[in-house]
Amino acid sequence: MTARGAAIALLLALAPAVAASAHEVSGGLGAAAAATDLYQITCSDDGSGAPASLVVQIRDQSPVAAPMLSVQVQKGLLLTNATDPVDGDTAFGPAVSVNGGAGGYDVLVNKTDAGSETYTLSYHCLTGPDGTGGHTGTSHTVRQNQ
Amino acid sequence: MRARRKRTRALGLPVLLFCLGTAAGGSADTQGGSLAAEASSARYYQVTCSDDGSGPPLSLVTQVRDLAPVAAPLLSVQIQKGNLATNGTDAVDADAGFSPPVWVNGGAGVYDVFVDKTASGAELFTLSFQCMTGADGSGMPAGTSISPSVPSVPALPALAALALVVGLIGGAGAAHRPRWPEPRP
């Protein structure tokens, strides 16, 4: 195998792992205390199995500022919420999940006070309830960016 | 789902609300509620805006008040309708003030309203909500209903009943409708 062939084989081998870990979106919230970003995350069966739940986490990134960042997930009558307690570290807030099956989930990101913030939102559709099971089809669209 | 309409605009009820400690701004509707100890605890309401004769609704405005006892979590309220969403947080626990008013200009129909908190620890709250005929929470109060309701925060039931009677007697004929929401500080 040539060096080029070996590189392509390596990339192909790495591709599934990249896809599995690529369900993160970086965003920013403007200075207004009411600023809210709204996403729709869609769970579907990509061949890995029917989705049972969506699990999300939020990471409040530097610069360190007063507001705390939170994420809410809602589908039908199901709702949950999580907050990253520490700003500017490398850790995400606690993982929370909604057992909403396949379809679109509304995901909101907002903060507790005035001041601009940046964040990373992690989101994964899974085949089991409560964020268990294997990873399955996951996509997102931005519906509001403030 | 059991729908329950809890209108506080009726004659005399502002007196009752005052005695209950909800201190709602003007004629806003209010809903007492609680959040369980786990950090992810959240309440989900649907507020419906309609034309009750005051005019077609253009916006929904909400506020949340973090009630005593004082605890670590901050309480927030979110509104979402279609592609529009907003958020407000009560910065001070157990004082007399609500969070700053926030609104969504979603017209008539159903708005999703969430109440949640930033950390673990049980919390009590009052949610204030009002559909308005103008954009950005302006204009006149319009038809407003909420579903589902949760048990009201128990507070001085005997005094509340007395206040209701006094309010109904003394409030008959009252025509003043206070402005809402409260102006920003």
Image (cartoon, rainbow, N blue to C red):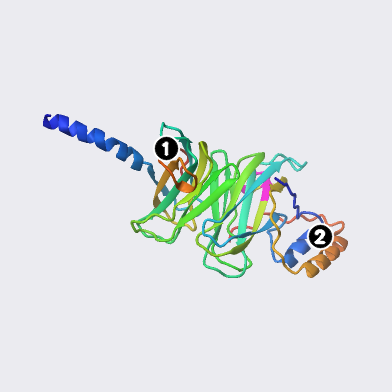
The amino acid on which the numbered mark 2 sits, given as a three-letter code, is: Gly
Q: Is residue A143 above or below residue B103?
A: above
Task: Determine which residue is flagged by label 1.
Answer: A136
> Distance from label 2 to label 1 (Cα)?
56 Å
Quadrant of the rendered structure where residue B54 is?
A: top right
Give residue A97's position: percent from left, percent from top.
Answer: 49, 48
Specify the label residue B92 is tagged with: none
**Residue B158's spot in the image, x, y percent?**
80, 69
Q: Amino acid at mark 1?
A: Thr
Residue in the image at 54% along x and 39% along y: B83
- Secondary element at tag 1: loop
The vertical placement of B171 against B71, above or below, is: above
Q: Examine the rendering and report whether any part of residue A104 can be seen.
A: yes
Q: Position of residue A77 (x, y in %)?
A: 60, 44
Q: Secondary structure at mark 2?
A: loop
Residue span colored magenta: B130-137
Using the image as rendered, state which of residue B118 and residue B57 is in the foreground: B118
Can you identify the residue that label 2 sits on? B12
Find out whether residue B132 is within the magenta segment: yes
Kindly indicate the quadrant of the structure image that contains residue A88.
bottom left
Disc 1: host chain? A
Q: Nearer the viewer, mark 2 or mark 1?
A: 1
